[in-house]
Amino acid sequence: FEQPFEDLNSFSGAMASKLKLTPGFVTDAFDTEAFSVRFNADDNFLAAAGSHGTVSIFNVATGQEAYRLKNGAGHPTKQVCWRPEKDSASVSTRGILVAASTDGRLRQWHVTSRRCLEEFGPEGEDKQLFCVDYSHDGTRLAAGATREIFVYDEETKKQVLCLQGGDSQTTPGHSSRILALRFQQTSDEPWSLISGGWDNSVQFWDLRAGHAVRAIFGPHICGDALDLSKDGKRLLTGSWRDKDPIEIWDVGQGERLEAMPWRSQGLNEPACQMYTARFSKDPEGSFIAAGGSCANDGGGEAKVFGSGSCLGTMVRFTCLSADFGSPNSGLLAMGGLDGRIRVMRMVGAASEGPKTAQG
C-alpha cells in the first residue's frame, strides 16, 4: 500500500458509523478451504491455513502468494499463529509462524526461508490439534486437542503442562473438541488461558493451578470464534446456532454483557451460524468481524460491526476465519469455504484512501 490507513485508535464509538469498508484484493484459491487467517505484526504478510495442510503466506502489498509451506502429510492445518516479536529481535528471529494440524503436530516455520524449524506435539497416535496461540510475551504456546490443552515452552519446545478435560458439568475442563483458545493478552496475567469448543462451554484456566478455575456454559464454538479484547476485559464468542450467535462477556465476572443480533430488528431469516468472530486490535476491541453459514440457503455471510451497528455485509460467502490488522492499518481479512481470502480496509467515509491490489 502506498500510504498508512486511517488509525482505528483515533475512532470513538460515535465515529464508527462514519467508517466504511473498501475492497482490497481477493486471493486465488490456495486450498479447498481457508480455516485460519492471520496478519503478522507489521501487516506486510498474511498467513492462511488450508484443509490439505497448505500454509500460504500472501504479500499484502501485492495480493500475491509469496511463500508456500507444506506439512508433508497433507493433514488439514486448522490454525496458524505468528510468534510475538520484540523490537530488539534480530532479522533471523523474526517472521516465525506456528501451525496446528490434525496429525497432532505443531510445526514452526521461518517464513521467508521456508524452513521448518521444529516439529513437535503430544505423544500418542490418536491426538489431533485444532487451535494454537502464543502467550503475550511469546515464551509459551498452547494447542487445543480433544479434551486436552497442551502447553509448551517456546525455547525448548518441551511440554510443560497438559490441561486435562472433564465432562464440563461436574469437573472443570472440556468434554469434547477444543476449537479455539486465547492467552490473556495483558502482561499482568500471563498464566491465564481461555478456551471453547463443541461441549457448549468456555473454560477459564489458571496455568499456575494446572486446571480450569471457572466456566461459562452456553457458547457452542465450532471454529475460530473466541477472542479477547486487547485490554483483556471483554470476551467475544461466536456460536454455531440460530439464537444469539454473537455474545460479549465480562472476563472478570463471567457475565454476559451483550447478545448482538445478526440482522436488524424484525429480520431473523435466514439465521447465520458462526464459524468465526474476532475483535479489532485497538485496546477496546471497538470492531467485530464475524461470519459463518446460513442453514436455509446453503450459503453464508460475513459482517463487520462497530458501535452496535453493521458497517458492511458480505453475502453468499461462508466465512471460516477472520483477522484484523494492527489499528493503524485498517486491514481486515476473511478466509472462506472456497479457499480464497478477501482483504478489505476500513476508512473514514470521506476518505478515498490509496489504491490497493485488486483480485
Image (cartoon, rainbow, N blue to C red):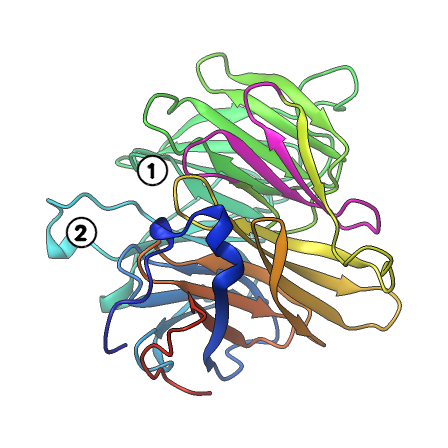
Q: Is residue 176 left or right of residue 99?
A: right
List x then y, in percent, for residue 331: 40, 65
List x then y, in percent, for residue 77: 53, 59
Q: Is residue 212 left or right of residue 87?
A: right
The three-letter code of the residue at mark 1 reads Lys
Q: Earlier in the sequence, mark 2 or mark 1?
A: 2
Q: 22 or 164: nearer the eye?
A: 22
What mark, if any, has residue 45 been given in the picture? none
Q: 294 or 195: nearer the eye?
A: 294
Secondary structure under tag 1 reads loop
Secondary structure under tag 2 reads helix
Disc 1 crowd, CA 10 A, few/some/many (<14, 14-19, 20+): some
Residue 177: name its quadrant. Answer: top right
Residue projecting furthest to the top: 209
Q: Is residue 53 visible?
A: no
The three-letter code of the residue at mark 2 reads Thr
Judging by the rendered image, the residue that carries numbered circle 2 is 93
Judging by the rendered image, the residue that carries numbered circle 1 is 157
Q: Is residue 63 magenta?
A: no
Residue depicted at x 43% and y 47%: 12
Residue 179: name its quadrant. Answer: top right
Q: Is residue 248 magenta?
A: yes
Q: Is residue 275 left or right of residue 152?
A: right
Residue segment shown in magenta: 228-253
Residue depicted at x 56% and y 17%: 211
Disc 2 crowd, CA 10 A, few/some/many (<14, 14-19, 20+): few
List x then y, in percent, for residue 223: 64, 51
Q: Please tell me whether mark 2 or mark 1 is closer to you in this view.
A: 2
Q: CA distance from mark 2 to mark 1?
A: 16 Å
